[in-house]
Amino acid sequence: MTGAERSNERGVSNQIHDGLFFHAVIQGRDITLQLPRAIQPALLGLPAKSPSFAGRDSQVREILHGLRPDRDSSQPTPTLLLSGLGGVGKTETAIQVAHQARIEPGWFPGGLLFIDLFGYDDERYLSSGIALTSLLHALGVHKEQIPDSTEDKSRLFRSILTAYAEGENRVLLVIDNASSAQQVEPLMPSDGTNLAIVTSRHTLNIKARIYELSGLDADSAVDVLRKVLRVALGEDENRVDSEISSAYHLAALCGYLPLALQICGAILVDTPRRPISSLADSLQKSQSLIDGLRREDHEIRSVFDLSYSRLSESEKQILGFASFSPGSDISTEAAARLIDRPAVDAEQMLISLSRAHLVEQGSAWGRWRLHDLVRHYALEKVEEFPGQESALIRLLDHYLEYSREGAALLGGSRQGELFTSRENALEWFDAEYQNLIACVQITAKQAELSGYAIEIPHRLARYMDARRLLDEWKEVMESSFRLLQGTEHEELKANALNSLGMVCRELYQIDSSIAFHREAVEVARSMGDRETLARYLNNFGNALSAARDFTGALEAHSGAATLFLDQGDTSGFARATDNSAIALREIGRPEDAVTLHQVAISKFREFGATESAARTLSHMGCTLQDLGRTDEAMAAHREAVAAFKELGLLNLVAHGLVNLSNSLRDGGDLDGALAASSEALELLASTEDAVGRARALNQLGLVRTDLGFIDQAICIFEESLRLLSDFEGLIDVGYALANLGRAHGIAERPSEALHYFEKAAKIFMEKNAATDFLSVQQIISVLSLAIVEDG
C-alpha cells in the first residue's frame, strides 16, 4: 500500500535520548513531552560572577543552606527572596549563590534557569506571560504546545518542574529584577523540591524566605574597594591600606552600596596615582549639590555624577545614545553608528565605560548592556547632546543595511561587503533579531520612521524562515502589511503578501497561503513587473501543491519558469523547474519529473548554488523511489544529506535522513532505516513543526511495524495522529490512519483495522488521492469479507 505508507521529507520528532517523559493536561488537551535530563545553564545566560565580590559571606552561606537538598525543615520554602534598594548587590549575590549551588554535587542535577524580568525598566519590562514563554522554550517545549493564557503557561511550567523533581533532577530558578508579586508568582515552582531565588527592590508578598540586603558593613565595603584595585592592578596595590581612614570615608560616602563602590574603585584603577582622599573630597562636594532625593538615590546619583564628569565628551555621548537603543543590548558596530565614529573608536570608549562600571559586557565579546539604574541616569543626561534623532536614524540605517545584505546572502546571493559567509549572516541575525523586532515596534509608532517598520520585516523573513521562527515571521509581516495600507508602495505590498503566503504555508494554514499568494500575483501583474511576477507565481504554485492542486501548481510553476527564462534568471528557472518536477511526480508522470530534476540540478551547480542543488537531489530521490529505482534514490538522498551537513543545515539534514530511511526500508535495510530515522529525530528534537514531527513518527512507525514491534508502532502512529489533531485538512492524517489500520491488521484485530482504514479512505477521497483511495478500498473489502466470514 504505497500511498498509505508514505513519509514526507519534512518529518521531525520530539524524541530525545536519555531524557524523561512528561505528560500533562492543558486546556483539555493532552501534551506529551520528552524533556532533556538536565537543563543547560547557558540556555538563559547566567552572568559571570564578579571577582571583586565581598562582604556577603555570612548571607551567602545562609542562602546556600536554604538551597541544600538535606536542609532541616518540615515545611520547605520553595522561594528565597533577596530584596533591597537599587545598587545594593542583589543580582550579584544571587549570581554568586547560583554559581556555587550549581557545582555542589547532587544539589541541582537538573540544572539552572536564569531570567531577568527588567521589572523596573518600562521599556524592557517582561510580563509573566512573556517570561513563561521564554522559560518554556528554554526547556525544549515547542511553540505550538505552549498555551495562550498565562495561567495555563504557569501550570505547564510548574508541571514540568515537578516532572524533573520526580525524576530526581531538581532545578534552581533564578528570577532577577521582579517588581511585583503579580509579575513573579506565575514563574515560581510549587512542588517544594525545585527552588527559586528572586531579586527585587521591594519586599514582595510571595510567601518566600526573605533576605533583606542592606548596604555593606564598613569593613566589607572597604574590602570591595581593596579587591577592585588588586584584581585590576595586582596584589602590590596598597592605597586602601595606606589610606585606610580615607577608604572608610569613601565607603561611607558611597552609602556602602556595592554598585557605587565598584564605580569608585574603577575611578581609582584608572588613576593609579590618585589618593583615595582626593576622590572622597570630590564625591563629598558632588553630594552637597544634590537636594530633594531619597538617601539611596542621593548616594547613587552623586557617584554617577562623579564618574560621569570624568568621561570624555565622546564617552558621554555614546553612553547617552546607547541608553535609547531599542533592544536589551547593543553591538560595538551599532554603538559606533550612533555616534558616527569608526567601530575601533567606539570599542575603546565602551571598554573605558566598562572599566568604569557604567556599561556591562554582554553575553559575548562585542556586545554591551547597561545596568537599569545607569540607563535611567544616561537617559536624563542624553538631553545634553544635540542630534538624538539623527543618531537614531543612523542606528536604524545600520540595522537595515546589515539585514539587507544578510537576507540577500541567505537567499543565495554571493558574498557582499559586510558578511564573510552565510553562517556569518546567520550569526549576526541570531544576535540582533530581537533588536530588529524592537526597531519595528518603536518605528511603527512614529509616522516619520514607519518606512523602517515596513522594510525590516522583509529582511527578517529569510532569517526567520531559516531558523523556523514562523510565528514571529508572520507577526512582523502582518505589522508591515498594516502599515502599507493606504500607501503607494505597491512593490512592498506585493512582497508582504507573498511573504505572508509563504509563512502561512509553513504553518500549514493553506487556504490563507493561497489567498495571500493569489493577491500577490495580481498586484505583480498590475505592476507589469515580470521578474517579480515569476517569483510570486512560483510561490503560488507551492501553495497549490500544499493544497494538492497539482495541476494548478504545474501551471503556475511552468508560467514562472518561462518568465524566469525570459529574464535570464537561471536560478529562478531552476527553482521553478524543480517545483514543476514535483507536480509532475504527483500527477503520475515520474519519468518526466526525473528529467526536470536533472535539468534543475545541472543549472544550480553551474553557479554554485549548493543548497538548492541538494534540495533538488532530495526531491529527485523521492521521485526515483516512486519509480522503484531504490538504489538510485538512496544515492541521491545520501548525497543530499552530506551536502546539508556540510552547510550546517541541520533541519534539512533531518528531512533528508527521513527520506533516506524511507528508501532504505523499501530496499529491505530495516536496521539502516531505523538508524536514519532515529538520527533525524535527535536532530529535530527541539523543532516547532508539529506536522513535521508527525510525519517523522509515521516513518518510524512503519519501520517498527516491519521489525515486528506492532504495539510500539501503534503507539507511535497514535502520537502522530495526536500531533495532527489541529491539522485535519492534511492528507498526512489519512496516511497515519491507514498505517495504524495496517498495524492493527497485522496484529489480527480486523475490526480495529477496518475502523481506521474507513477513516483513511474518507480523507483520501476528499483529497482526490485516487491511488491511495483505491488501495485502501481494496483492503476494506478484504477486511469486511473476513469479518463477515468470522461471524
Image (cartoon, rainbow, N blue to C red):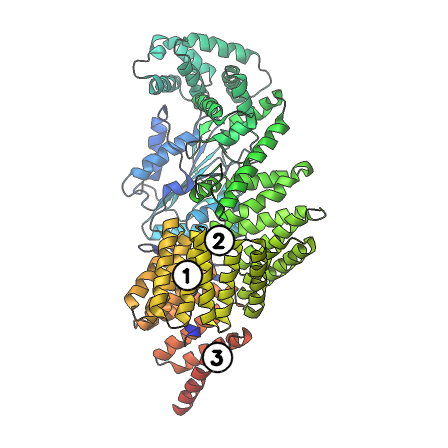
According to the picture, the residue beneath numbered tag 3 turns out to be 758
According to the picture, the residue beneath numbered tag 1 turns out to be 618
According to the picture, the residue beneath numbered tag 2 turns out to be 143
478 and 294: which is toward the camera: 478
Disc 2 residue crowd, few under 14, some 14–19, many 20+, Cα 10 Å? some
- Mark 1 or mark 2: name the one nearer the start of the chain: 2
Q: In which quadrant is the N terminus drawn?
A: bottom left
Q: In which quarter of the image is residue 384?
A: top right
Q: Give the distance between the C-alpha atoms of the residues marked 3 and 2, in whole angstroms.
A: 33 Å
For this view, does 479 lie left or right of residue 214? right
For this view, does 436 lie left or right of residue 664? right
| Residue 281 locus on image (x, y percent) | 48, 8
- SS assignment at label 1: helix
| Residue 508 locus on image (x, y percent) | 53, 61
For this view, does 209 lie left or right of residue 444? left
- Residue 352 position (above or below residue 583): above
99 and 382: which is toward the camera: 382
- Mark 1 or mark 3: name the one nearer the start of the chain: 1
Residue 77 seen in the current view:
no
Q: Give the distance between the C-alpha atoms of the residues marked 1 and 3, in whole angstroms.
A: 32 Å
Residue type pointed to by label 1: Ser
Residue at 53 percent across and 57 percent down: it is 573
- Residue 38 position (above or below residue 398): below
How many badges with numbers are in the image?
3
| Residue 588 locus on image (x, y percent) | 48, 74
Residue type pointed to by label 2: Lys
Contact between marks 1 and 3 (CB within 8 A): the answer is no
Residue 246 seen in the current view:
yes
Residue type pointed to by label 3: Glu
